[in-house]
Amino acid sequence: MTAPVVPARSPEAVAAGVSEAAPARSSAELIRAEEPVLAHNYHPLPVVVARAEGTWVEDVEGRRYLDMLAGYSALNFGHRHPLLIEAAHRQLDRLTLTSRAFHHDRLAGFAERLAELTGLDMVLPMNTGAEAVESGIKVARKWAYEVKGVPADRATIVVAAENFHGRTTTIVSFSTDETARTGFGPFTPGFRIVPYNDLAALEAAVDETTAAVLIEPIQGEAGVIIPDDGYLAGVRELTRRTNTLFIADEIQSGLGRTGRTLAVEHEGVVPDVVLLGKALGGGIVPVSAVVGRREVLSVLRPGEHGSTFGGNPLAAAVGTAVVELLATGEFQRRATELGTVLRDGLTGLVGKGVVGFRSRGLWAGVDIDPALGTGREVSERLMREGVLVKDTHGSTVRLAPPLTITGEELGAALAALERVLTRRV
């Protein structure tokens, strides 16, 4: 295939520092154009989004879709939330990047507010969720050697099967998803994998070398798997008793998604370290953070860890605005109230193509009767009905709409799901 010719920018456009609009192309043309130039690390639905506002997105042909995925929880506050956009615009006019070679005037306020929101002491700002997980692993090992007294290079971290913490080399080393692992070895040692929601197995895996237990309070990629009542409290009790860190990966489950600021709050648990990302950037810029007890994060010294963009002024300004939205409690209340609507609606679909589901707040994993199609096929049918979701494993689809969704919009999405399950649109 011959590569398309890219029009040269005019001298006037170059001088002005602006780009000229590309010729209009259809969704099909744009999807075909990606094929030879983009690495195939995703399998997106065949929709090309060009604009978005609130809970709705619009493709290049002007078709509108209700977004029931919200960027895997990165868009908890919807697309282009006005207060977040305003915060970004204000900061863009002042300062965007210094690197951590210097201080800047937005970082202290961001860290103070985020620590207060989570009930912890210190913040290590990063960019992506996987970066936060990698940072948490490094901090846990350093803490194990300097505070717990684990012999050098012997620290272990216990994780749960079917986990999803990212796709970097170290993280896929303790994944049980062969698609994520195959072809990427050799793998990083130092991890022990136990079944999720199994306290006895967890206790058997923890010993004097264990630096931390790293788990998702709710497993997202696995299909929104919610542990039994008491599991998280049991993890907390075990880690305290064994002088082991409890690291909660709240990158998908946190920041209002489940009806609480953090999912661990449903059991009144405060981990030693919380990993945050996705919604922390307000759907505008990548922002993540490791938030923890002072004793834990204080093991880091200058030069031992870093990130050029971590905690940059633009990220700090947007992150601060996100924390201020959550501090009102409005989004947690909405997730709780509308979560009841979601749960009731899905209950009514059991036996009508839904064979089971799990939900907490505005987050659900819905198991579709395999006879009706795979999760991918159901997602494509919903797309044709004007609703965007994404499948996970097998015949399971995830629902995670923006927390700004209305009851009417949620009802419309559930009605569309019923239509695709009962008459195969």
Image (cartoon, rainbow, N blue to C red):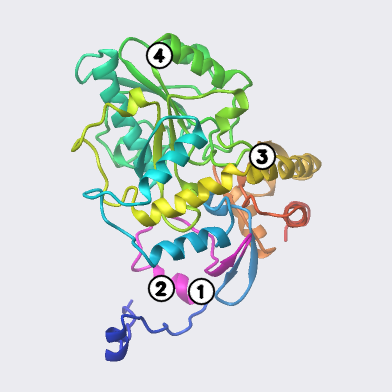
The residue carrying mark 1 is: 28
Q: Position of residue 293 (x, y in %)?
A: 40, 26
User: Which quarter of the figure is the N terminus placed in?
Assistant: bottom left
Is disc 4 surrounded by few (<14), some (14 to 19) or many (20+) residues within 10 Å? some
What is the C-alpha distance between the residues marked 2 and 1?
9 Å
Find the residue positioned furthest to the right: 348
Which numbered disc, 4 or 1, marks the residue that appears first in the sequence?
1
Q: Secondary structure at mark 1?
A: helix
| Residue 249 left/right relative to 5 | right
The residue carrying mark 2 is: 33
- Closer-to-camera residue (217/303): 303
Q: Position of residue 284 (x, y in %)?
A: 46, 58
- Closer-to-camera residue (293/259): 293
The residue carrying mark 4 is: 205
- Closer-to-camera residue (93/132): 93
Q: How many marks?
A: 4
| Residue 184 left/right relative to 394 | left
What is the C-alpha distance between the residues marked 3 and 4?
32 Å
Q: Amino acid at mark 1?
A: Ala
What is the C-alpha distance between the residues marked 2 and 4?
49 Å
- Closer-to-camera residue (30/69): 69
What is the C-alpha distance between the residues marked 4 and 1?
51 Å
Q: Amino acid at mark 2?
A: Ala
Q: Residue at x 36, y 26 (%)?
A: 294
The residue mark sitting in front, 1 or 3, is 3
Q: Amino acid at mark 3?
A: Gly
| Residue 74 left/right relative to 370 | left
**The magenta stretch spans residue 11:** no
Q: Residue at x 73, y 53 (%)?
A: 410
Magenta segment range? 29-56
